[in-house]
Image: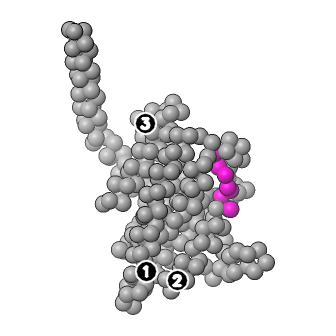
Amino acid sequence: LAKVQDEGGHGLYLYSAAETLGVSRKQMTEELVSGKAKYSSIFNYPTQTWADIGAIGWLVDGAAIMNQVPLCRCSYGPYARAMIRVCKEESFHQRQGYEIMLKLAEGSPAQKEMAQDALNRWWWPSLMMFGPPDGESEHSDQSTRWKIKRFTNDELRQKFVDATVPQAQRLGLFLPDPALAWNEVEGRYDYGEIDWEEFWAVVKGHGPLNKARVAARKKAWEEGAWVREAALAHAKKRAARQTAAIAAE
Protein backbone atom coordinates (compact mmCIF):
# COMPACT_ATOMS: atom_id res chain seq x y z
CA LEU A 1 0.00 0.00 0.00
CA ALA A 2 2.84 2.40 0.85
CA LYS A 3 4.45 1.76 -2.54
CA VAL A 4 1.19 2.42 -4.39
CA GLN A 5 0.73 5.63 -2.41
CA ASP A 6 4.29 6.65 -3.27
CA GLU A 7 3.74 6.05 -6.97
CA GLY A 8 0.56 8.14 -6.81
CA GLY A 9 2.68 10.94 -5.38
CA HIS A 10 5.09 10.63 -8.29
CA GLY A 11 2.20 11.14 -10.66
CA LEU A 12 1.17 14.29 -8.82
CA TYR A 13 4.72 15.68 -9.06
CA LEU A 14 4.68 15.16 -12.81
CA TYR A 15 1.18 16.51 -13.31
CA SER A 16 2.23 19.64 -11.42
CA ALA A 17 5.32 20.03 -13.61
CA ALA A 18 3.23 19.59 -16.75
CA GLU A 19 0.71 22.18 -15.54
CA THR A 20 3.47 24.81 -15.62
CA LEU A 21 3.42 24.41 -19.42
CA GLY A 22 -0.22 25.49 -19.56
CA VAL A 23 -2.13 22.21 -19.76
CA SER A 24 -4.67 21.46 -17.04
CA ARG A 25 -4.68 18.31 -14.92
CA LYS A 26 -8.29 17.73 -16.00
CA GLN A 27 -7.28 17.72 -19.66
CA MET A 28 -4.37 15.34 -19.04
CA THR A 29 -6.56 12.95 -17.08
CA GLU A 30 -9.27 12.97 -19.73
CA GLU A 31 -6.66 12.21 -22.40
CA LEU A 32 -5.44 9.30 -20.29
CA VAL A 33 -8.86 7.71 -19.74
CA SER A 34 -9.84 8.24 -23.39
CA GLY A 35 -6.75 6.34 -24.53
CA LYS A 36 -5.20 9.34 -26.29
CA ALA A 37 -2.33 9.81 -23.84
CA LYS A 38 0.43 7.21 -23.66
CA TYR A 39 1.92 5.89 -20.44
CA SER A 40 4.70 3.47 -19.52
CA SER A 41 4.37 0.08 -21.19
CA ILE A 42 5.34 -1.70 -17.95
CA PHE A 43 1.99 -0.85 -16.32
CA ASN A 44 0.19 -3.19 -18.69
CA TYR A 45 1.63 -6.44 -17.35
CA PRO A 46 -0.03 -8.57 -14.64
CA THR A 47 1.41 -9.42 -11.23
CA GLN A 48 0.96 -13.09 -10.44
CA THR A 49 2.87 -13.90 -7.24
CA TRP A 50 4.44 -12.25 -4.20
CA ALA A 51 7.82 -12.51 -5.94
CA ASP A 52 6.54 -10.09 -8.58
CA ILE A 53 6.57 -7.36 -5.93
CA GLY A 54 10.28 -7.96 -5.44
CA ALA A 55 11.02 -8.19 -9.16
CA ILE A 56 9.11 -5.00 -9.87
CA GLY A 57 10.95 -3.10 -7.15
CA TRP A 58 14.34 -4.41 -8.25
CA LEU A 59 13.94 -4.28 -12.03
CA VAL A 60 11.19 -1.80 -12.83
CA ASP A 61 12.18 0.80 -10.27
CA GLY A 62 15.82 0.13 -11.07
CA ALA A 63 15.15 0.85 -14.74
CA ALA A 64 13.17 3.95 -13.77
CA ILE A 65 16.09 5.25 -11.72
CA MET A 66 18.51 4.63 -14.59
CA ASN A 67 16.20 6.57 -16.90
CA GLN A 68 15.27 9.36 -14.49
CA VAL A 69 18.53 10.28 -12.74
CA PRO A 70 19.82 12.11 -15.87
CA LEU A 71 16.51 14.00 -15.98
CA CYS A 72 17.34 15.50 -12.58
CA ARG A 73 19.82 17.66 -14.51
CA CYS A 74 17.65 18.40 -17.52
CA SER A 75 17.05 21.92 -18.83
CA TYR A 76 13.49 22.42 -17.51
CA GLY A 77 13.48 23.33 -13.83
CA PRO A 78 9.99 22.14 -12.73
CA TYR A 79 10.58 18.76 -14.38
CA ALA A 80 14.10 18.42 -12.96
CA ARG A 81 12.92 19.23 -9.44
CA ALA A 82 10.10 16.69 -9.72
CA MET A 83 12.60 14.06 -10.87
CA ILE A 84 14.87 14.68 -7.90
CA ARG A 85 12.04 13.84 -5.50
CA VAL A 86 10.90 10.87 -7.58
CA CYS A 87 14.39 9.36 -7.75
CA LYS A 88 14.93 9.60 -4.00
CA GLU A 89 11.79 7.53 -3.45
CA GLU A 90 12.48 5.13 -6.33
CA SER A 91 15.85 4.27 -4.81
CA PHE A 92 14.05 3.03 -1.69
CA HIS A 93 11.68 0.93 -3.79
CA GLN A 94 14.60 -0.59 -5.70
CA ARG A 95 16.47 -1.55 -2.54
CA GLN A 96 13.30 -2.97 -1.00
CA GLY A 97 12.62 -5.03 -4.13
CA TYR A 98 16.14 -6.41 -4.23
CA GLU A 99 15.90 -7.35 -0.54
CA ILE A 100 12.68 -9.28 -1.24
CA MET A 101 14.34 -11.13 -4.12
CA LEU A 102 17.38 -11.90 -1.95
CA LYS A 103 15.23 -13.38 0.82
CA LEU A 104 13.36 -15.53 -1.70
CA ALA A 105 16.50 -16.60 -3.55
CA GLU A 106 18.12 -17.68 -0.28
CA GLY A 107 14.96 -19.34 0.99
CA SER A 108 13.41 -22.70 0.22
CA PRO A 109 13.66 -24.28 -3.25
CA ALA A 110 10.04 -23.27 -3.89
CA GLN A 111 10.77 -19.67 -2.92
CA LYS A 112 13.84 -19.52 -5.16
CA GLU A 113 11.82 -21.00 -8.02
CA MET A 114 9.16 -18.32 -7.48
CA ALA A 115 11.83 -15.60 -7.59
CA GLN A 116 13.29 -17.02 -10.80
CA ASP A 117 9.82 -17.23 -12.37
CA ALA A 118 9.19 -13.54 -11.58
CA LEU A 119 12.55 -12.58 -13.02
CA ASN A 120 11.79 -14.54 -16.19
CA ARG A 121 8.53 -12.63 -16.69
CA TRP A 122 9.72 -9.12 -15.81
CA TRP A 123 13.17 -9.00 -17.39
CA TRP A 124 12.21 -8.21 -20.98
CA PRO A 125 9.37 -5.78 -20.15
CA SER A 126 11.89 -3.94 -17.93
CA LEU A 127 14.26 -3.53 -20.88
CA MET A 128 11.36 -2.23 -22.97
CA MET A 129 10.80 0.54 -20.41
CA PHE A 130 13.63 2.55 -21.96
CA GLY A 131 11.60 2.99 -25.11
CA PRO A 132 12.14 1.89 -28.70
CA PRO A 133 15.60 1.47 -30.24
CA ASP A 134 17.28 4.77 -31.06
CA GLY A 135 16.54 4.45 -34.77
CA GLU A 136 12.79 4.29 -34.03
CA SER A 137 12.60 6.84 -31.21
CA GLU A 138 10.47 9.58 -32.70
CA HIS A 139 11.10 12.38 -30.19
CA SER A 140 14.64 11.63 -29.02
CA ASP A 141 16.42 14.10 -31.30
CA GLN A 142 14.19 17.01 -30.28
CA SER A 143 14.40 16.11 -26.58
CA THR A 144 18.19 15.96 -26.86
CA ARG A 145 18.37 19.36 -28.59
CA TRP A 146 16.25 20.86 -25.83
CA LYS A 147 18.52 19.16 -23.25
CA ILE A 148 15.57 17.33 -21.71
CA LYS A 149 17.10 13.99 -22.66
CA ARG A 150 20.80 13.53 -21.90
CA PHE A 151 21.30 9.90 -22.98
CA THR A 152 19.70 7.83 -25.73
CA ASN A 153 17.32 4.93 -25.08
CA ASP A 154 19.90 2.34 -26.07
CA GLU A 155 22.63 3.95 -23.96
CA LEU A 156 20.44 3.83 -20.87
CA ARG A 157 19.31 0.29 -21.62
CA GLN A 158 22.94 -0.82 -21.86
CA LYS A 159 23.80 0.84 -18.55
CA PHE A 160 20.87 -0.97 -16.93
CA VAL A 161 21.95 -4.35 -18.27
CA ASP A 162 25.55 -3.81 -17.15
CA ALA A 163 24.40 -2.85 -13.64
CA THR A 164 21.81 -5.61 -13.27
CA VAL A 165 23.77 -8.67 -14.40
CA PRO A 166 26.08 -8.66 -11.34
CA GLN A 167 23.07 -8.18 -9.08
CA ALA A 168 21.38 -11.24 -10.57
CA GLN A 169 24.61 -13.21 -10.11
CA ARG A 170 24.67 -12.22 -6.44
CA LEU A 171 21.11 -13.51 -6.09
CA GLY A 172 22.06 -16.80 -7.75
CA LEU A 173 19.35 -16.24 -10.36
CA PHE A 174 19.64 -16.41 -14.14
CA LEU A 175 18.56 -13.72 -16.56
CA PRO A 176 16.30 -15.28 -19.22
CA ASP A 177 18.54 -14.40 -22.17
CA PRO A 178 20.71 -17.13 -23.76
CA ALA A 179 22.55 -14.46 -25.78
CA LEU A 180 23.70 -12.60 -22.67
CA ALA A 181 27.52 -12.55 -22.59
CA TRP A 182 30.37 -10.33 -21.47
CA ASN A 183 32.00 -8.45 -24.33
CA GLU A 184 35.64 -8.06 -23.36
CA VAL A 185 36.45 -5.72 -26.23
CA GLU A 186 33.57 -3.31 -25.57
CA GLY A 187 33.68 -3.69 -21.78
CA ARG A 188 29.95 -4.36 -21.54
CA TYR A 189 27.39 -7.15 -21.71
CA ASP A 190 25.88 -8.12 -25.03
CA TYR A 191 22.23 -9.13 -24.81
CA GLY A 192 19.63 -10.67 -27.07
CA GLU A 193 17.10 -9.05 -29.37
CA ILE A 194 14.08 -7.50 -27.67
CA ASP A 195 10.64 -8.46 -28.99
CA TRP A 196 9.78 -5.07 -30.44
CA GLU A 197 6.49 -6.37 -31.84
CA GLU A 198 5.36 -6.99 -28.28
CA PHE A 199 6.57 -3.53 -27.25
CA TRP A 200 4.65 -1.74 -30.00
CA ALA A 201 1.54 -3.83 -29.36
CA VAL A 202 1.54 -2.70 -25.72
CA VAL A 203 2.23 0.93 -26.64
CA LYS A 204 -0.68 0.86 -29.09
CA GLY A 205 -3.07 -0.49 -26.47
CA HIS A 206 -2.99 -4.21 -27.22
CA GLY A 207 -0.98 -5.49 -24.25
CA PRO A 208 -2.07 -8.01 -21.61
CA LEU A 209 -3.83 -5.45 -19.41
CA ASN A 210 -4.10 -2.22 -21.41
CA LYS A 211 -7.88 -2.21 -21.53
CA ALA A 212 -8.28 -3.22 -17.88
CA ARG A 213 -5.85 -0.55 -16.66
CA VAL A 214 -7.50 2.27 -18.61
CA ALA A 215 -10.98 1.06 -17.64
CA ALA A 216 -10.00 1.18 -13.96
CA ARG A 217 -8.72 4.75 -14.29
CA LYS A 218 -11.85 5.78 -16.24
CA LYS A 219 -14.11 4.28 -13.56
CA ALA A 220 -12.22 6.08 -10.78
CA TRP A 221 -12.35 9.37 -12.70
CA GLU A 222 -16.08 9.17 -13.30
CA GLU A 223 -17.01 7.95 -9.81
CA GLY A 224 -14.81 10.61 -8.22
CA ALA A 225 -16.52 13.48 -10.05
CA TRP A 226 -18.74 14.33 -7.06
CA VAL A 227 -15.68 14.68 -4.81
CA ARG A 228 -14.05 17.15 -7.20
CA GLU A 229 -17.29 19.09 -7.55
CA ALA A 230 -17.77 19.25 -3.77
CA ALA A 231 -14.18 20.43 -3.25
CA LEU A 232 -14.56 23.17 -5.86
CA ALA A 233 -17.89 24.29 -4.37
CA HIS A 234 -16.35 24.45 -0.90
CA ALA A 235 -13.39 26.47 -2.19
CA LYS A 236 -15.76 28.85 -3.95
CA LYS A 237 -17.84 29.39 -0.80
CA ARG A 238 -14.73 29.90 1.30
CA ALA A 239 -13.37 32.48 -1.13
CA ALA A 240 -16.73 34.28 -1.11
CA ARG A 241 -16.72 34.41 2.72
CA GLN A 242 -13.17 35.77 2.76
CA THR A 243 -14.11 38.42 0.18
CA ALA A 244 -17.17 39.41 2.22
CA ALA A 245 -15.10 39.61 5.41
CA ILE A 246 -12.53 41.87 3.77
CA ALA A 247 -15.27 44.10 2.37
CA ALA A 248 -16.88 44.38 5.84
CA GLU A 249 -13.63 45.68 7.31
Q: Residue 10: x percent and y percent?
A: 43, 50
Viewed as shown, does residue 222 lie left or right of 205? left
Q: Earlier in the sequence, mark 2 or mark 1?
A: 1
Mark 2 — residue?
170
**Closer to the camera, 120 or 172?**
172
Q: Residue 29: x percent and y percent?
A: 42, 40
Q: Earlier in the sequence, mark 1 or mark 3?
A: 3
**Are there few (<14), some (14-19), or many (20+) residues within 10 Å of tag 2?**
few
Q: Is residue 242 above or below residue 118?
A: above
Viewed as shown, does residue 139 lie left or right of 64? right
Q: Amino acid at mark 3?
A: Arg
- Is there CB contact under 8 Å for labels 2 and 1? yes
**Quadrant position of residue 194:** bottom right
Viewed as shown, does residue 154 lie left or right of 96? right
**Are there few (<14), some (14-19), or many (20+) residues within 10 Å of tag 1?**
many
Q: Earlier in the sequence, mark 3 or mark 2?
A: 3
Whole-angstrom CA distance, mark 2 to mark 1, is 9 Å
Residue farthest to the top, as pictured: 248
Mark 3 — residue?
25
**Closer to the camera, 136 or 67?**
67
Report the span colored magenta.
148-155
Q: Amino acid at mark 2?
A: Arg
Residue 162 forms part of the magenta stretch = no
Q: Is residue 18 visible?
A: yes
Look at discs 3 and 2 and give the one toward the viewer. 2
Whole-angstrom CA distance, mark 3 to mark 2, is 43 Å
**Quadrant position of residue 241:** top left
Colour setup of the view: one colour
